[in-house]
Each structure stands twice: as C-alpha cells, then as structure tokens.
Image: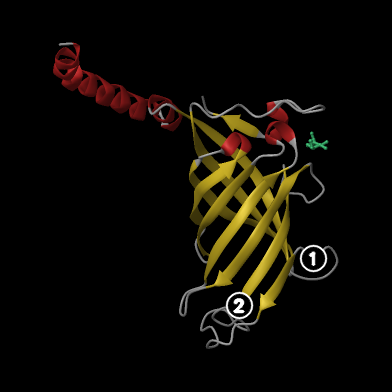
Amino acid sequence: MALVSMAASMPRVVVIASLVAALAMAAGPAAAAAARGGRLIHLRFYMHDITGGPGQTAVQVVKGSGPAHPVMPGSYFGDTTVIDDALTEGASATSRSLGRAQGTYTLASLREPVLSVSMTVALTGGAYNGSTIAVVGRDDVSATVRELAVVGGTGAFRRATGHVLWRTARMESRDHMVLELDVYATVPGASPPPPPRAGAVRQGDLNLINLD
Ligand SMILES: *[C@@H]1O[C@H](CO)[C@@H](O)[C@H](O)[C@H]1NC(C)=O
C-alpha cells in the first residue's frame, strides 16, 4: 500500500524537482549546482610555464618524430613536455604560492596549434591545502579562451566535475608564459569539507570565490 501511494506521488515530485532545477538555473550556476545537491567552487590562479632558462619548470621529454608542424615553427607532431609549474595567487611569479600543476602536454594536432593537456592541480596553500584537481583537455593556443574539463579530484574535490577557462595572461619572457586559470568545480553535497589544518589561512586569502 505504501509502495503504491509512493509511486502515485512520484510524478509530482519529479515535476517539482525539475521546477526547482529550472528556477535554480535561472538564478545562476551556483544555485543550479545546489539544486543538484552539489556545491560549486570557483578558484582563480595563475600558472607559470617556464620552458627554459633559470627556474625552468617545463621540460620537453619527447621530440616528436612526426611531421614538422605547419603553424608552430620548430615543433613536431607528438612533442611532449612534462610540467611542474608553479601556481600563484596573482599574475606575478612572486605573488603567494598556491600549489603546482603537474602533468604533461602533447602537440596532438597535425594542422592546428593544439595541445592535449593532462595535469593534476596540487593545492598546497589556502583553504584547500592538500586537495587536488584533475584537469584534462584540448588547449588550442590560438584561441583567446580555452575550455578544459575537470574530471575529478581528491580531498575537498573528491568526485568533482566541471570545467576550466584557460587564458594566456602574459609572456614574462620568451620562455615564461603566464596562464590565468578559472576553475569551476562542482562537488557532491556529501563531500567532506576540506580537512582543518594547523596554520590554514582564511578562504578569502586563496583568491577564492565561493559562489554559494
Ligand atoms: C599545507 O599542509 C601541509 C601538510 O599538512 C603543511 O605542512 C603546510 O604548512 C600547509 N601549508 C599551508 C600554507 O597551510
């Protein structure tokens, strides 16, 4: 009997849930994430890709044997670089350190200036110290804004989904490119809050915009 009445009331619940979701969409992505039982976390930071000289953090480990690239002089299809790039709060390399971006990028288009990126953002400062975010995607370096995917994470970013908007902020030198990354990650509502850590700084200090 209870099962029957539950089933009968189901459609109404579904309608209400869709209405809530629709209203939440209108109210913005944070509200939409909340309606799905998640929490949207927005982080902005800068990534320093230094491919040579003092303080080098990006090393080419594969010289592609593929054809010479038509629009990237001196590059070859398959060229692969391993990175351990510094992440900072501001665009300046001397601004507060927030962590490292560790992974690889490969020149993966025969004709376009497109890198295939796979990296882990390891946060070592601020409210999310100790958490990581897995980022994968296509970086068309000729585009002003590139969108990559957040495919997971650990700690506060366990089961995260979302995207990263990725821009070239400036060239510090021929070898030092500064990238601006806006991470929009939705984590399930049941995810544990970031573990408290001795000496942890306030959330605002991480240049963190929590849209909730
Ligand atoms: C981040 O966590 C590590 C390990 O718990 C700790 O040693 C370090 O001091 C923390 N850093 C900040 C900036 O809170």
To which quarter of the image does residue 200 belong? top right
Residue 68 placement (x, y as % from top left) = 55, 87
Q: x%, y% of residue 6?
A: 19, 15
Q: How many marks?
A: 2
Q: Label 1 neighbourhood size at 10 Å, few (<14), some (14-19), many (20+)?
A: some
Q: Amino acid at mark 2?
A: Asp
Circle 2 sits in a helix, a strand or a loop, which is it?
Answer: loop
Tell me which residue sits at (52%, 28%) in the image. Answer: 211
Residue 115 located left or right of residue 27: right
The residue beneath circle 1 is 56
Q: Is residue 108 shown above or below 84?
A: below
| Ligand 1 rendered quadrant | top right
Amino acid identity at mark 1: Gln
Residue found at x 73% / y 59%: 84
Q: Quadrant of the N terminus?
A: top left
Q: Residues within 10 Å of mark 2 (few under 14, many from 20)?
A: some
Which quadrant of the view contains residue 58?
bottom right
Contact (Cβ within 8 Å) of mark 1 with mark 2:
no
Q: Which residue is mark 2?
A: 79
Q: Residue at x 66, y 44 (%)?
A: 45
Is residue 141 visible from the viewing direction of this image? Answer: no
Q: What label does residue 165 carry, if any?
A: none
Q: Is mark 1 within 8 Å of ligand 1?
A: no
* Of callouts 1 and 2, the N-terminal one: 1
Q: Relative to the observer, which residue lies in front, 200 or 96?
A: 200
Horizontally, residue 185 falls left or right of residue 88, namely left
Residue 35 lies, in percent from the top left, at 38, 25
